[in-house]
Image: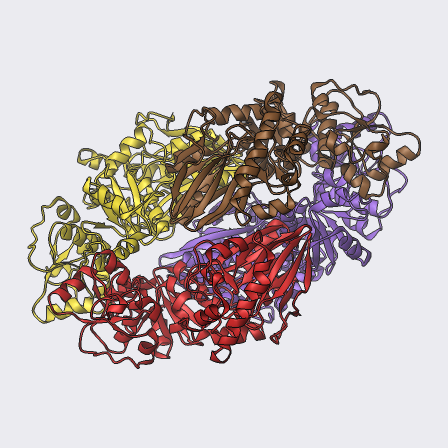
Chain colours: A brown, B red, C yellow, D purple
Amino acid sequence: MNIISLKSPGLAHLSYLVSSKQEAAVIDPRRDVLEYVRICKDRGLNLKYVLETHRNEDYVSGALELADALGAEVYHGEQLDFAYGNPLSDGQVLKLGNLKIKALHTPGHTIESFCYLVEEKKGPVALFTGDSLFVGEVGRTDLSGEGVWKELSEKLFHSIQEKILPLGDSVMIFPGHGAGSVCGHAIAEREISTIGLEKRDNPLLRLVKEDFVQHKITEKMDRAAYFRVMEEMNLNGPPSMPSFPGIKRISSQELIKHQQQGALVLDARYPQSFAAAHIPGALNIMKDGIASYGGFVIAPGSRMVLVTVDAREAEEAAIFLMRMGFDDVLGHLNNGMESWIKEGRPLQSLGLLSPKELNDMIEAGEPPLIIDVRDEQERSEGIISGAVAVSLESILSGNAAIDGEREAVYYCASGYRGSTAASIMKARGHLRSTVLLGGIGAWIKAGFPILQSDEI
Amino acid sequence: MNIISLKSPGLAHLSYLVSSKQEAAVIDPRRDVLEYVRICKDRGLNLKYVLETHRNEDYVSGALELADALGAEVYHGEQLDFAYGNPLSDGQVLKLGNLKIKALHTPGHTIESFCYLVEEKKGPVALFTGDSLFVGEVGRTDLSGEGVWKELSEKLFHSIQEKILPLGDSVMIFPGHGAGSVCGHAIAEREISTIGLEKRDNPLLRLVKEDFVQHKITEKMDRAAYFRVMEEMNLNGPPSMPSFPGIKRISSQELIKHQQQGALVLDARYPQSFAAAHIPGALNIMKDGIASYGGFVIAPGSRMVLVTVDAREAEEAAIFLMRMGFDDVLGHLNNGMESWIKEGRPLQSLGLLSPKELNDMIEAGEPPLIIDVRDEQERSEGIISGAVAVSLESILSGNAAIDGEREAVYYCASGYRGSTAASIMKARGHLRSTVLLGGIGAWIKAGFPILQSDEI
Amino acid sequence: MNIISLKSPGLAHLSYLVSSKQEAAVIDPRRDVLEYVRICKDRGLNLKYVLETHRNEDYVSGALELADALGAEVYHGEQLDFAYGNPLSDGQVLKLGNLKIKALHTPGHTIESFCYLVEEKKGPVALFTGDSLFVGEVGRTDLSGEGVWKELSEKLFHSIQEKILPLGDSVMIFPGHGAGSVCGHAIAEREISTIGLEKRDNPLLRLVKEDFVQHKITEKMDRAAYFRVMEEMNLNGPPSMPSFPGIKRISSQELIKHQQQGALVLDARYPQSFAAAHIPGALNIMKDGIASYGGFVIAPGSRMVLVTVDAREAEEAAIFLMRMGFDDVLGHLNNGMESWIKEGRPLQSLGLLSPKELNDMIEAGEPPLIIDVRDEQERSEGIISGAVAVSLESILSGNAAIDGEREAVYYCASGYRGSTAASIMKARGHLRSTVLLGGIGAWIKAGFPILQSDEI
Amino acid sequence: MNIISLKSPGLAHLSYLVSSKQEAAVIDPRRDVLEYVRICKDRGLNLKYVLETHRNEDYVSGALELADALGAEVYHGEQLDFAYGNPLSDGQVLKLGNLKIKALHTPGHTIESFCYLVEEKKGPVALFTGDSLFVGEVGRTDLSGEGVWKELSEKLFHSIQEKILPLGDSVMIFPGHGAGSVCGHAIAEREISTIGLEKRDNPLLRLVKEDFVQHKITEKMDRAAYFRVMEEMNLNGPPSMPSFPGIKRISSQELIKHQQQGALVLDARYPQSFAAAHIPGALNIMKDGIASYGGFVIAPGSRMVLVTVDAREAEEAAIFLMRMGFDDVLGHLNNGMESWIKEGRPLQSLGLLSPKELNDMIEAGEPPLIIDVRDEQERSEGIISGAVAVSLESILSGNAAIDGEREAVYYCASGYRGSTAASIMKARGHLRSTVLLGGIGAWIKAGFPILQSDEI
């Protein structure tokens, strides 16, 4: 048996290629499947199965495209009516080389969630846990809606305690996400584990049922708008990947035309670069933040043009977007923001404050409006004195009551979402929108005081 | 914590790069260290330690070169007096990002063998076992000589039972070799395990001490001549890698000159290609067999010229040789064997028999000499009726009494060593040296009978 | 202006990417267009035009696929009614960045042949000559049939003398093929030239019209069966490239099944490897010979399975085939010929003779049948005494009268076509088919005599 | 004959690999020679010669290292006493495969300059012109000092008119630099030419001797401080390349320590990113500008730490520096400027003005100090009204008289050198140093007026 792990950065999504005797199966492939194909080629593997642990909601599945490309069979849980692939029932066994892969129905994260147990002749050795069990965390149970939240939380408890943990301490665990995923708040840095290690280290596995369920149904995690779109796609068969996403270069004139026709100008540079000079009306989502919160800020179906430092970054941004189903990237500004600047075109800027500058203003008794755009859980660890909490959603929807005449400094944990918020408000006409460089993280490291939540 | 595994094919050697918070350690690096350097670069890791589990004997260590390149510290067991690096004592702890790496003295394979235990805040999670414990096997104890064979076997028993297994079923295991290594006979295909899985599946872990020691001191594994050379190098600090090994192309004339001056002509093509046409006097070791039995057949310090199909294969062969300390590769025949043929130069051939052809001869009552060059353990599973066992060593040393006038067909498991033996005898003047295509493996699959060892 | 040349080995086909101010044009793209796409991406070029010098006959054009992928326009001569792209008239000018590209109608090779002249502000600098003018050669005029052979030869004379040469000695020339192409016999090794150099060095440019035409209409170049298929495809719009050509691995059992159902077993290994052991019934075309004479030997539309040394070579072979429109490659034998041998399956072999062995037989007065499979022009430089000329075509069609009971040794220039011929005859039941290692080239270099053609 | 061109961006340096019959020569290799090695390997070429056209002054030569790596011979002009390699005399011929390479002494750029003429059997075909003749330009004659400026200019005239041009219009030309090099002001975009095209298009080739010499000795090109260092190195044998330049990552603390000990903090980001937030005291040279004007601004022998967006850019910057002999790069800030910001460390910023903002200030009658840092030749095409010319050199040396209390806006052609200048003055305590975004290029494109030089 051999297992190769492939990670999609940003999404922190983990997919796997397991093989034996030149037969292979892929678990939860991402949308751009070339890397799985390449591995099969290089290692001489015939892909036999594509196994989905559940209908994924945070990315477009590559299962259909990969199976078509290499002549494999797709499998997923029978509890949902997928428009493609084969239904799996609990306990069903697939043969792969010398191995048996046993499908275990483990509802909880979703109703049709499965884990895949790899068995050698002498017994089970590895479990692909999908979004049921992570290293140090368990899967979310809120995504199917409030109506079944409690019920799914109870099912997850039973799936873990009665199906997964009894497999034995020695069995290795390969989860569907690593740290940084929107699918779990406290996922550990390590991406591989064993059942025994989880029993020892994962605090949620030691809760009794009532406490476990209570913990789950009081979790406060945001749910991105695009999740629903992914779910639809992954149920009905996702569209095949666009060829060469992100490759089209457009001139400044074309960008302006697209913007006039309603396209979103998405500037994926660092906040300080964006703040210094950007195209009027642009939205700033730093490239590395696209996968984790782009889906909250960009409306499904949006037409977009990208502005980056260079073409390589535009392509990366386009791939991140494409993995989340945002296929309408019309192109990226040729030669990046530099060409716009060199052409002498209109520029807009945001204010920037270093922690020291903001603190000086506060100490001088002339603070700006200070706006904290983090979520409730993050704020519970402390805020800057005087800060007002305003969610990205309310900023986006225009419901936030912010005085447009005053300087308003936006902050989040590290500065990215703060810049996103400021870019939205600037585009709305709040000319004195300002970003706190490095967010509250830099503020704290610079030695300035925070207010603990219980002090508020 | 993140662990990346790098495998050197042929040697089936596994080295690891473990990292946390952008600090990294490499366990048992191979001689060509560029890949570790590349990973550190790509992932932004600062290499802090190079950890040796023991003085390796089957390859030249890259520890010194890697540590020098990236400014890291080398560590190895204090029980040997290494000329470089830092001595480790049992229980010593090294910090790596958020991790502690605890060095456990586990003598047995050698007197200075160590395992490295990775501990997170909540407890131990992974063990790098070097050549102490493999998946399904344990390390050899015969390499330090007959005098301490029994003693080391006992020590290995204690190291495993008292130091490794008590770490707990849940701890993951990363061994120093995979299947196919000369360092263990029964290593499993899977390259990762847990202590619990080994307790369940590894038959040697269930033996009582007497049986374990008895098993170890009756093992019959060959010991290659070059092992002693590797040990010396790895103790005293291996020479740095030759730049661009294998790159030099030489003409037919140069090859002839080198051969006249005593250089070995090593033909690394498949047996059937070699048999069809080769340079008179050439030794055939199929490229993929170099790492596993080249060290048995090539004298340490040999000067060599390579003959392959193309330059890519010559480079692979040169890298395999270089990893084993054979640095005197003078070049490879430019454009491979094709150029020799196209130049109309003298050619030699070996006889080839398919299983059917050999069987026809036997059935006709006119069998050739049939010579089995496998080792004792392999022969115990059955031989071709009438075959005589002759070891590669005795063929090489010229001690084998084989009638040079009769056709002699050489076989091994799959045909490679058979061709090596036939090529040696042909060069010695046995003109009717012949190879059984596919060895006894093909013979059996073709449906022809074998004699079980107990029938002999 | 920047020009990048891309060569397809085997076909010796040269395509070009010319660019200025980030606009690009590709001249005569091959079917697998990924490399052009990659260059455009890496260099930030927008592809504006795909320019065809003529309806190519020796490979499938990638013009349509490339233009679709990157949003470019295809252009070709108006004299043929292409089902896609835009018609060009003589003298038409296209703008590309700072450049003008002037289309020059240069009939001769075909009726709709064009050259493309690149002009900077100060005048013309480079000419893409397609198959009109090569370095040291001119294009073939026989491909459109006997009826127009003479007429096209005359047109070619006029195109070169009146349209190309007057552009001036200083203008650089970028032709459509290099040495080794089936599109010209005497193409030089150098792949770039100037009009002045061609006037000085190209012997055909110094002929008067009568001699030029006479030379052209007495040329004896073979015309491959697949040319007609390519022409049809390239006129009507070639099918898009198969995804991952050559990737499918098949087992021995599957190979046998395909062979029973009429698929061709194409063994792409070296002649000596093939001769030593091959699958009964297999056809041997050495991989590097596929592009140059595979199209003469393989019937258009053939279903094939490949046998090679390894997967990498299978893929290369499949790409060579795919470029020529052979898309029905059903797969390649997994792990190559080795797996067949190791499974103990039936094997066939060919006889092999080194030049010395053949000469010994001749000197002993017991020569085998000696068969020369080269074309008329090659034979004019000398043959082995006693050899009979038999064309590959007549061998293929079964029209060659060869005594199946006698040993017959086949030779060509270097051994590849000899082995192809022997493999065909062996499959037809001529059991004593034999190959001369290294062909007549090796024979001559080994110092054995040849008969000059005028001695015959 | 085959010629491969390798370009080093930034330096716009062109080196060549010419080959015939698997023998190769490299002309003017850059310091990092791996790419030449790789090509030789991939194509099966044996490197026979490394040919230097002259003692290069704008980069460290890789001749010695490359020749050592592959066993080739170095050649350069006998007029200088090189400490390595072989002296060449005028007319000397070297054989390479089927080719002759004839060394032509062409003094002018330097006293020991050579061109290399490639001759086939039928005559000369290509000339490697080094820094004697470029496409559209000729080499500089000022680098050997005022004393011989005129004499070398005369020699260059004779070398071109009497040695190069007579070779004939048809001969192809491969020069040592392309557009953007500091070795020639008006080099064309096209990188390949013919003698005939140069005679037609290169204005300097039509001047009579007096005018040519007059033109040369009135050229005003800056001479970087590091040129003298390169010359010494290239004469005496350059030190071998540092392994893995730029790989070392350093923490913020380490950077601070290095800065305190006198190391230069070189920030290689875009001007606007630098302006928004940078480390106090840092010098801004945008990465792509390092090769062209870094040598003017960085003192030879400087110890440096780099600040970039990411590790990839740091490596590129380090390679640019290493090619110019700046080997003392101590490391780059781990995770780039982001980590500094997120750690809440002290930040500095520069003012930024868009063309419109500057024009508004001018129109309002309250212009800042406007400082033009371009060279004399650039300024002759027009300046912003009110601008004062101050050279980078005088800014660097502290000789520029600029009022430190007033806002001073620095501009160059596109903004990079302007930012370099502003960063120097900011570090000197001029707190109101400001950069014009996009330089005068953006200013003009935005439609604002310039003053022609004759109006000044």
Q: From the viewer's perspective, is residue C294 above or below residue D112? A: above
Q: Specify whether C316 is left or right of A216.
A: left
Q: Specify whether A405 is left or right of B382.
A: right
Which residue is at 80% across, 21% downward? A402
Q: Nearer the viewer, residue B394 or B333?
A: B394
For the image shown, how many numbered marks are present on the structure?
A: 0
Q: From the viewer's perspective, is residue D146 above or below residue C6? A: below
Image quadrant occupied by the C terminus of chain B: bottom left
Task: Evaluate whether residue D435 shows in this view.
Answer: no
Q: From the viewer's perspective, is residue D308 above or below residue A227? A: below
Q: Nearer the viewer, residue A168 or A116?
A: A168
Horizontal and vertical percent position of residue C339:
30, 54
Horizontal and vertical percent position of residue D252:
76, 51
Q: Quadrant of residue D62?
A: bottom right
Q: Quadrant of residue D189?
A: top right
Q: Specify whether D248 is left or right of C14.
A: right
Horizontal and vertical percent position of residue B411:
27, 67
Q: Nearer the viewer, residue B445 or A141?
A: A141
Which residue is at 65% across, 67% downward? B90
Horizontal and vertical percent position of residue A244:
49, 34
Furthest-right residue in view? A364
Task: Evaluate whether residue B86 shows in this view.
Answer: yes
Q: Nearer the viewer, residue C34 or D408?
A: C34
Which residue is at 47% across, 74% downward? B142
